[in-house]
Image (cartoon, rainbow, N blue to C red):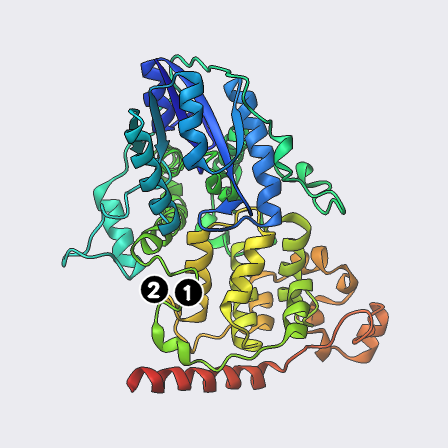
Amino acid sequence: MKTIVWFRQDLRIADNPALSAAAERGAVLPVYVLEDGAPLTNSQPLGGAARWWLHHSLAALQRDLGGLIVLKGDPQVLLPELAAKTGATEVMWNRCYDQYAVDRDTAIKAALKSAGLTVESHKAVVLFEPWELQTGAGGPYRVFTPFWKAAKAKGVDQPLPRPASLTVSDCGLSIGVDALGLLPERPNWAKGWLDLWQPGEAGAANRLNGFLDLGLEGYADRRNRPDLPNVSRLSPHLRYGEISPRQIWSAASHAADANPARADDADKFLGEVVWREFAYHLLYHYPNLPTDNWKTAFDAYPWRDSAADLKAWQRGETGYPMVDAGMRELWQTGYMHNRVRMIAASFLIKHLRLHWAHGEAWFRDTLVDADLASNSASWQWVAGSGADAAPYFRIFNPYGQGQKFDPEGDYIRKWVPELAKLETAYLHAPHEAPDTALVKAGIALGTTYPKPMVDHKTARQAALDGYTVVKNSQSA
C-alpha cells in the first residue's frame, strides 16, 4: 500500500501524526505543493523572509526523509493526479485552521474521496483543536487568562516518536526545491542568514535544547531583555512545523520537573506557547481576524495616512533608538525580540497613528516566523482592537522602555551603531543630550541620526484623542 502524505505546516518527521499513520500502512509518498500564484502562508502571500526559510526547511526535510516530491500548482488537481500515477490509495495530512485552508482541504477531501481514495486528517499544528477548549457557556474563548487555565487543566498529549520504520517511495515526479524559486537573488538580502539560523528539524531540536540548557533559567524575568539570551527563538521552527508545540511542552515540563527551581520560568515560557495556541483559536473562530478589527468600534479610529512616515518606521529611522534598533534587527536578521516587537508596533499605531494592517503586512514580509494567526492577533492586541487586547490608554514610552529593558544600551549599540559612542545616560533619548556629548560621540542629529519624527507627549495625546472617538462610537 502507498500513502501520500501532504506536508504543509508540519515539516518534520517526529510527532507527525499523518506521517506516523502512513508509515504504519506501508510505503510513504511525501509531497509538498507550492500553490499557484503567490505562495501562501495560510491564506496570505508568503513574504520574502518566509520564502527564504521555506526553501531551506524543505531542503532539510528532503534530506531527512531521503526523498520529497516537490510540486507547484493547484493541490486539488495535483494530488489526485499523483495518486493515479503512483497507485497510491490513501492521502493523509495534518490540519490547518484558517478559513482558506479549511475550505481548500474540504474541497480536496471531497475530490479525492470521489476518486476512490481514503483520506485522513490529523492534529499536529496545535496542542488543542480550536473546538476542544470552550467556555462554560460552550463558546470560544475571548480572553487569554481563562484560556491558559483551561489548557493547563486539560493537559497535553505526549508527542509521538519518529516512525519505527519509514519507507519513502520516490516516484521521480518531483520538480525539486530549487525550481520553486524561493530564494532572493537580485539582491540576495539574506546573505549570511545561514550563519544565524539552522532551518529544519535538527535545527529546531538544537534550538530547543540550547534554550533549555542556557536560557530557561531566569526566563520569567529576563525574557523582556533584548540584550540577554533568555529567549528561545523557536518561533520560525514552530511556524513551519519543524518542531511541534507538544514536543516543546513535553521538553519544558521535563526540564521543570528535573529542576523545580525552574518551574516558574517553564510556566512563563509555556504561557507564551499557549498564547500562540490562543491566536489559532481566535483565527479559527473569527476568520476575518487578519483583515478586520475584532472590535468593530475601532473602525471609527481616525487613522493617518503617510507613506513617508511608514517608510521611516520600516527603515528604523524614527529618531527613537529602541524602535530603530528593533526595525533594523528585523531587516538584517528576519527576527525581532518580542518585547521590542511590542514597542515598535505600539509606536507605529499610537505615535504615528498608522493602521495596524501596515505593520502586520511589513512583519509578514520581513519575519522568518511570519504566522497568520500570531501576527494578526498580536497586532490587534497592541492596537487595542483585538481579543483580550491591551487597554487603549496603554501607550508605551519608547524612551522609558529602552531604559528599562536595555539599561546598558547593548541592544541599541548593536543595531544602531551610529549611536554606539554616546554615553548611556543619553543613549535612549539622544535629542536630549547636550551638544558636547553629541560631538564627543560623533553624532549630528538630523544628519548622522534622525531627530525624533514626532514628540512623544504630543503623539500620546493625539492617540488618546483618537481612542476617544472609538469610545464614543462604542457608546453610540
Q: Position of residue 303 (x, y in %)?
A: 51, 79
Q: Report the residue at 61% width, 47% height from top.
A: 49
**Residue 422, position as x, y percentages in the image:** 76, 67
Where is residue 160? Give x, y as percent.
Answer: 34, 25
Helix or strand or loop: what does disc 2 sit on? loop
- Look at mark 1 in the image and give the residue it sits on: 381
Pointer 2 residue: 387
Which quarter of the figure has residue 159?
A: top left
Q: Is residue 301 visible?
A: yes
Q: Nearer the viewer, residue 209 or 168?
A: 168
Residue 319 in the figure: left or right of residue 303: right
Q: Residues within 10 Å of mark 2 (few under 14, many from 20)?
A: many
User: Please, what is the three-letter code of the amino acid marked with disc 1?
Assistant: Trp
Considering the numbered disc 1 on the image, is that residue within a helix, a strand or a loop?
A: helix
Nearer the observer, 12 or 223: 12
Q: Is residue 144 left or right of residue 452?
A: left
Residue 126, located in which quarter of the rendered image? top left
Verify CB contact (< 8 Å) between mark 1 and mark 2.
yes
